[in-house]
Image (cartoon, helix red, strand yellow):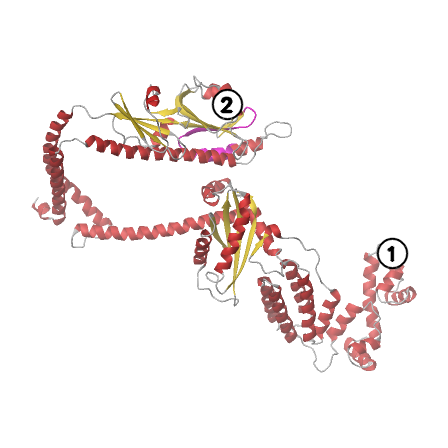
């Protein structure tokens, strides 16, 4: 015992409790000396606060129910009938499955029913008829299936039916249910909805214990029909006749020793009536009892403080052990406080980490919606929790911002997360509802919500205004490209289509027009492009012979011509890539230089794909020409190059390639060229030319229906007899026999 008394932590607890006892005595004495007049006003004021909290809880529950009905309307299939007017069971099962997942999240929803213009009722538990549902499972003295069937067929606003007792025929079980019906066609779909609410579960989810004992609560809809009451057999006729309720303020009424307080919900216009006893009875006996309670409470408090000091000391030591301070000397409570502060810091860190995880999950849900692939039902069910975050309006447009450093691979000062946050903050200043996601590299996607499709023009203008302003602030030293899609309905399946719209917008943008934002609705297809084959062949010849300046001039003319046609970005990109790949064919790379050639190709193709304007595409091609020319192994002193000669013959075999013509092309004499050719190729020039021509002639004979004379002309022979004689000399058979032997 002495050890306990000497313990510092125990004495701290004891004296702390004594301090509480002293303060309690002082306040009790003040209350006693000033009697308990005014307590009722304080209690009723507290009751008003409790009632307002209860009303907020009711509003929250009705909000959840309205959101449920809204989400059910948003489900697909405005009609489930097939061509014969019969229900399509695949659609019915899909609706049932979706309805089951939605209803399972709300404990106080007993059942939900979807029906159309016939009597089939779709519920989370299966399909049924209105007769089976409301004449067997939910039987009421007031309402039957005929009533419900007639009611939901008529057009009216969402209606709440008062709480009634419904009995199940088979088990005899009774349930107190409210019914919300929405059969209006002015909403999102043609579905007729009924939601059955278990009143007992609803009241259990709303804490009514905070009201004054003996008080009760009634709920009236916006038409002053009683839909819920915690007190049975309550007659409100006289009360409602005596009060004039101003919707903008509260009202009160005293009637038969009871006070009735009227409140109106700001959310749905429902009226809440709180009935409570008027004034306390036996006020003097309460005063005397308060005196004895005060003395008894003080005595018991002293005794309890001793017992609690001993009892609470062990948990204090245990808490210190958990916090890792049990063996450290010092004030026990100071050590506990320092341990709690440490835990708070750790909790803040964990909270921050969870926020990042939640943000990344929402990004994952959004990116998953873009891939368009089917996922498992379990995965879809988990992801649906985030859909409400993505879609807060009836419609949306998708926008994109692509960034690129001015100096290529320059390191950015801001991280991707910081860029995402700054873009989100900047867009929120000009747009009402926008969500920003990081897609990949320096690419960002936005979902911009709108209630009306006509708002798109305003959103486009504000989005363009933001990009113009951000070029000098957030996007300083960055190239910025923006794009905005068409308007889509707010559902997850629309995301992939919107994303494809964005991708097409970047591909089909006008290469010759500087736009802050590409509007996908304004894009018009340009069918014609300029791709001169002869000039491309000349480009190859220029590179083969080292005429770099002439090659640059050819590329310049091709780009200028296509720019004047206002072709699309992807068309210009394909033209540029084709030109570059044709240039690469002219490089006679050795085994050692193949890696350099591979790096050259990857580098130029990457620069072409990153180019935004035709000037940038031109600069990339000019660099490619210079680097290809530097890698080309041609003889600067002589134009006689085997690769060039063979390629020139291959490209021009159908022309009159006389020996003098080849000597003129190669800037040499006929005799020197003939000797050079024989020495280099092992055969004389005429024989080599005939072999090239006849190899093409054989392909024409096998794969076309052209006449012998036409094939001779196409392969460079002046007449059919010369062609036939030459063909038989080298191939052993005539052209017609060759065609016959090869299936033509």
Mark 2 nearby-residue class (10 Å; few <14, some 14–19, many ≥20): some
Q: Camera-side residue: 702 or 94?
A: 94
Mark toward the viewer: 2 or 1: 2
Is tag 2's residue or tag 1's residue first in the polypeptide sequence? 2
**Span of residues in magenta:** 96-119
> Does residue 104 appear to the left or right of 77 in the view shown?
left
Residue 721 in view: yes
Check residue 740 in the rendering and tell me which mark sits there, or answer none.
1
Q: Is mark 2 on a helix, strand or loop?
A: helix
> Does residue 445 appear to the left or right of 556 in the view shown?
left
Cα–Cα gap, marks 2 and 1: 83 Å
Question: Which quadrant holds the N terminus?
Answer: top left
Residue 441 in view: no
At horizontal 45% and vertical 42% (from top left) the residue drawn is: 385
Inspect the magenta stretch and tell me whether residue 110 lies in it.
Answer: yes
- Residue located beneath label 2 in the image: 151
Please, is residue 286 above or below residue 616 in the view? above
């Amino acid at each position: 015992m002495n050890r306990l008394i000497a313990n510092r932590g125990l004495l701290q607890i004891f004296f702390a409790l004594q301090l509480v006892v002293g303060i309690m005595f002082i306040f009790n004495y003040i209350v006693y000396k000033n009697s308990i007049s005014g307590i009722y006003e304080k209690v009723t004021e507290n009751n008003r606060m409790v009632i307002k909290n209860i009303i907020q809880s009711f509003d929250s529950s009705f909000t959840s129910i309205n959101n449920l009905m809204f989400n059910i309307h948003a489900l697909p299939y405005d009609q489930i009938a097939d061509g014969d007017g019969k229900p399509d069971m695949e659609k019915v099962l899909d609706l049932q499955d979706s309805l089951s997942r939605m209803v399972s999240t709300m404990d106080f929803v007993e059942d939900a029913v979807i029906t159309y213009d016939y009597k089939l009722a779709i519920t989370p538990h299966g399909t049924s008829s209105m007769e089976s549902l409301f004449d067997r499972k939910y039987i009421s003295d007031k309402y039957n299936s005929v009533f419900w069937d007639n009611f939901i067929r008529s057009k009216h606003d969402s209606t709440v039916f008062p709480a009634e007792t419904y009995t199940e025929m088979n088990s005899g079980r009774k349930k107190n249910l409210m019914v919300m019906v929405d059969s209006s066609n002015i909403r999102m779909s043609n579905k007729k909805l009924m939601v059955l609410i278990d009143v007992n579960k609803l009241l259990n989810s709303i804490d009514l214990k905070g009201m004054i004992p003996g008080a009760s609560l009634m709920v009236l809809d916006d038409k002053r029909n009683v839909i819920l009451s915690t007190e049975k057999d309550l007659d409100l006729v006289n009360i409602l006749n005596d009060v004039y309720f101003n919707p903008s303020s509260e009202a009160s009424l005293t009637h038969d020793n009871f006070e009735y307080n009227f409140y109106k919900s700001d959310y749905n216009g429902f009226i809440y009536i709180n009935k409570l006893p008027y004034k306390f009875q036996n006020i003097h006996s309460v005063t005397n009892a308060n005196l004895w309670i005060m003395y008894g409470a003080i005595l018991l408090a002293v005794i309890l403080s001793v017992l609690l000091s001993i009892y609470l000391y062990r948990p204090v030591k245990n808490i210190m052990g958990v916090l890792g301070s049990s063996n450290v000397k010092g004030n026990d409570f100071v050590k506990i406080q320092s341990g709690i502060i440490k835990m708070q810091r750790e909790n803040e860190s964990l909270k921050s980490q969870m926020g990042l995880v939640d943000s990344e999950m929402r990004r994952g849900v959004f990116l998953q919606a873009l891939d368009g692939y089917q996922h498992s039902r379990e995965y879809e069910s988990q992801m649906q929790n985030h859909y409400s975050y993505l879609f807060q309006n009836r419609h949306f447009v998708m926008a994109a911002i692509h960034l690129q450093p001015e100096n290529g691979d320059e390191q950015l000062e801001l991280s991707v997360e910081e860029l995402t946050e700054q873009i989100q903050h900047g867009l929120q200043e000009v747009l009402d509802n926008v969500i920003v996601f990081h897609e990949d590299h320096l690419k960002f996607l936005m979902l911009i919500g709108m209630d009306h499709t006509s708002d798109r023009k305003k959103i486009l203008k504000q989005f363009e205004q933001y990009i113009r302003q951000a070029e000098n602030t957030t996007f300083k030293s960055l190239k910025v490209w923006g794009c905005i899609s068409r308007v889509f309905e707010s559902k997850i399946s629309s995301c992939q289509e919107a994303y494809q719209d964005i991708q097409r917008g970047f591909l089909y943008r006008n290469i010759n027009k500087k736009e802050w934002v590409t509007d996908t609705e304004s894009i018009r297809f340009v069918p014609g492009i300029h791709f001169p084959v002869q000039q491309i062949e000349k480009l190859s010849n220029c590179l083969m012979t080292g005429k770099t300046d002439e090659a640059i001039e050819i590329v310049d003319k091709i780009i200028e011509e296509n720019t004047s046609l206002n072709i699309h970005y992807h068309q210009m990109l394909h033209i540029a890539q084709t030109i570059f790949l044709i240039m690469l064919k002219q490089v006679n790379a050795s085994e050692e230089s193949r890696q350099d050639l591979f790096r050259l190709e990857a580098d130029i193709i990457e620069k072409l794909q990153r180019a935004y304007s035709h000037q940038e595409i031109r600069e990339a091609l000019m660099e490619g020409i210079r680097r290809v020319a530097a890698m080309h192994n041609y003889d600067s002193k002589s134009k006689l190059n085997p690769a060039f000669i063979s390629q020139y013959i291959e490209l021009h075999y159908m022309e009159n390639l006389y020996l003098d013509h080849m000597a003129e092309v190669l800037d040499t004499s006929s005799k020197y060229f003939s000797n050079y050719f024989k020495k280099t190729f092992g055969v004389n020039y005429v024989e080599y030319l005939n072999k090239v021509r006849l190899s093409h002639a054989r392909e024409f004979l096998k794969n076309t229906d052209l006449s012998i004379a036409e094939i001779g002309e196409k392969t460079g022979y002046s007449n059919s007899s010369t062609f036939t004689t030459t063909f038989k000399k080298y191939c052993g058979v005539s052209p017609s026999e060759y065609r016959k032997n090869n299936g033509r």
